[in-house]
Image: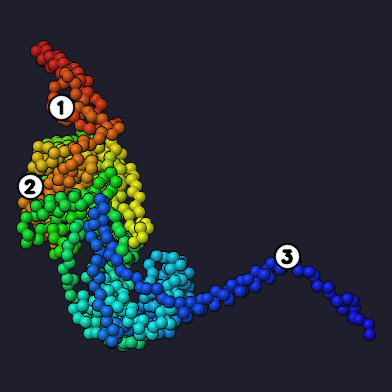
Amino acid sequence: MKPSEDSPEHPPVPRPATLWTKLRRRLGWATLVSMLLLSGCGMYLLRFGALPAGSIMQSTQIFDSEGVVLASVQGGVNRHIVKLADISPWLAKATVAVEDRRFYEHAGVDIRGLARAAWVDMRHMSKEQGASTLTQQLARNLYLSHERTWTRKLKEAWYAARLEQTYTKDEIIELYLNQIYYGHGAYGAEAAARLYFNKPAKQLTIAESALLAGIPKGPRYYSPHLHPADAKARRRQVLEALVATRQITAQQAEKANAKPLGVRPLPEEQTGAAPYFVDHVKKIAVDKLGIDERLINEGGLRIMTTLDARVQKHAEEAVKQGLPGGDSELQAALIAIDPRNGYIKAMVGGRNYRRNQYNRVFASSRQPGSSFKPIMYATALDRRAITAATRFRSEPTLFYYDGDRQIYRPSNYNNRYFNGEIGLRQAIASSDNIYAVNTIMQVGPKQVIETARKLGITSPLNAIPSLALGTSPVSPFEMASAYAVFAGQGRQSEPIAITRILDPKGRILYEAHPTSTQILSPAVAYVTTHLLESVFERGGTAHRISAIIKRPVAGKTGTTDSDAWFVGYTPELATAVWVGYDRGRPITSSEAHRAAPIFARFTEAALAGTPPTPFEIPEGVVNVTFDPATNLLAAPECPAEWTTEAFVAGTEPTETCALHHDDSDRKQEDSREGRSWWRKLKQWW
């Protein structure tokens, strides 16, 4: 039989393997063997590997600028270990429902939940979903730090798997409910139940259990003491999760949701040094720097701050001396910033931290009154709208704005007016409101707001004429930050409280790198400062405290019906002081005069070891002697009441009175000649 035409005459000869083919085969076998070995090791470790010892909680310490301990955060941990049988089953059910619904189905790591979370994250291009199970959270709390690395996540998953092999589900829930942090120093369900409801965990109701189960996700944000509205909303989410998992009915959820939070007041704590500042440091570390709150409370961190303990002591003493009467509800706040670097040197948020922890330094509901005027005047000087020689009449005046559709009728304190023209220095010293409104009408409210934003004021500001008189509320912190720019020759250094954060091994978790930005020209900052020094001169609103301060100082008073302010500075320290009542109750005349003495006593005591330093005159400033009545430069042949003022170069008066004196003489001669000619004409007629 003949071979087919399609079949080859000879069988194919195999080609010899190339070097690349041999290499690929060897790599494939090596990879397979490695995977088998790794799988075997993983299975061995998973089956027989021992869990490490649980982490030991350490107190975080907060230090002042000299390395002295200000406070130890959670030095004593509030924890009571109990059996699962001594914890309300509603708390266990609520915790599982809101944190890990598949807890009883997975083996430590929820692959399905992980895939779902990854899919949601991919769709939203962000971390919208969490994927940690209760067992993983327990592993992290027991054995690991809170650093966000893949290594930690892998360890967390492995420890979770080992926990699932070592303990039953009920034992894991028991460990979790005794380990988790519920805020305000309470660790574990028993401590939390007693702290918030003054009862054992076994007696918790559905509503109470739902409230507690919602706290661990964010102990600060969902604290019923700090944020009751957020805590209640979170409780509703937990109740809805219980309904979704068929643990309770919708009717039970609605009934529980209608109940008040019912938490008892927090017990009084021992007050350490600078307690308002310590609270601020913890808040900044968590909210701004992203440090985990659990790490703050038990991670043994070392937080280095900018506070000067000696300056802080003088601040507390000045406030105490300025607010006599221990039972009075009159409050005060003081914040002091070093304008050279933005370091917060002292902070007093109220007269008694133990009674009230509210930090009034950051209360943005207070009208600054006339203490806002320097921001407006600096804007006008910067934009050449006015100079130190500009004069306006001090008398009752109507101002038309909004296209002449609205009228503003400001008045001076006690209806006192000069009833004549005054200059900028006199207007600042006497806090004349008519001059201030004339100025803002010249420069424009929107331009003033633009400058305020650059100076660090973030509170809402209304672009209306009354803005010049400080009718838009701001915080003492914002005012001190703004004045620090004047003290720093126009440079803004962002206020900071924390310089470094170290972990227990000394590794740097955060380090501040202060920066400064030129916000105003040094000339404008100096001219503003030079004018604000007049407040302490005779006739100025702060003249009564001038004897206390023995160094160059600038500042401004501010008084409204319910607020008294003094904001001032030296080259080394910018300080804002506020005095008033928390509920906006009107202050008396004597109470309105308490802010300035607090500022004076504090500033002099805080800088007692610092030699008096004058404000440096920068380039771009000229001092000119002129006649304030005519704004003409002085000359020997023109006797008048001369004054010397600082001007931004290019805005100073340039004409001398001599030229106008000659013109005036000629006009008088021409007038005499004219009268003589007319007399002769009448006689001839």
**For mark 1, what is the residue?**
642
Relative side of 420 to 238, left or right: left
Using the image, tell me which numbered label, if any, was put on residue 414.
2
Q: Residue at x 28, y 62 (%)?
A: 60
**CA separation in Å, label 1 and label 2:** 30 Å
Q: Amino acid at mark 1?
A: Trp
Q: Earlier in the sequence, mark 2 or mark 3?
A: 3
User: At numbered mark 2, what does the secondary structure look like: helix, strand or loop?
Assistant: helix
Packing grade of label 1 (10 A; few <14, some 14-19, many >=20) is some
**For mark 3, what is the residue?**
19
**CA separation in Å, label 2 and label 3:** 101 Å
Q: Position of residue 42 (x, y in %)?
A: 51, 76
**Residue 533 picture quarter:** top left
Along the line of sight, the residue nearer the viewer: 546 or 273: 273
Packing grade of label 3 (10 A; few <14, some 14-19, many >=20) is few
The nearer-to-camera label among 1 and 2 is 1
Along the line of sight, the residue nearer the viewer: 636 or 219: 219
| Vertical order, 615 against 218 (above or below) | above
Q: Earlier in the sequence, mark 3 or mark 1?
A: 3
**CA separation in Å, label 3 and label 1:** 101 Å
Q: Amino acid at mark 2?
A: Asn
| Vertical order, 54 against 253 (above or below) | above
